[in-house]
Image (cartoon, grey):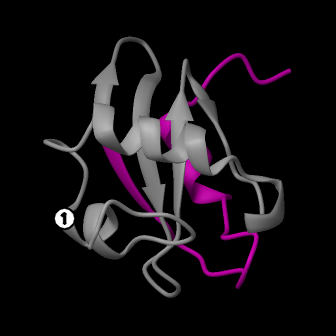
Amino acid sequence: MVRGMKRRLMEILACPIDKQHPLELYVFEEREEVVEGIIVCPECNRFYPIIDEIPHMLPDNLRSKEEDLKFLKRWVEKAPEKIVKEGRPFNLGP
């Protein structure tokens, strides 16, 4: 049973949309494990939030726009600019 987001998990994760590997990891808060952060697919520019140590690797149709935008607003200062402005499926751009 996975009890949280460990950095070594990045070795096996791929984008659920285009199967891109490796993915980029941006850590916002870390203790023994990554508590809050973002996983980014460099191929399709999708982001997957890590919330309370859990990576949310869901396809677009199962994601909550409200939750994703709330997460981006909370971490706007630490999130990659490309994701804040142009991330998929949702972003804070114009």
Asked whether residue 49 is drawn in magenta, I would say no
Residue 46 x/y as whole percent: 52, 71
Which residues fall within the magenta stretch?
Answer: 1-26
Left or right of residue 41: residue 29: left
Q: Residue furthest left?
A: 77
Q: In percent of the image, x 57 and y 30: which residue is there? A: 5
Within 10 angstroms of label 1, few (less than 14), some, or many (20 or more) residues?
Answer: few
Q: In percent of the image, x 29 and y 61: which residue is there? A: 84
**Quadrant (top left, top right, bottom left, bottom right) of the C terminus:** bottom left
| Closest to the observer, 39 or 63 | 63
* Magenta segment, prevailing SS (helix, strand or loop): loop
Does 53 sit above or below residue 13? above
- What residue did someone put label 1 on? 81
Does 35 sit above or below residue 92? above
Helix, strand or loop under label 1: helix
Residue 7 x/y as whole percent: 48, 39
Q: In which quarter of the view is residue 76 placed?
A: top left
Does 33 sit above or below residue 27? above
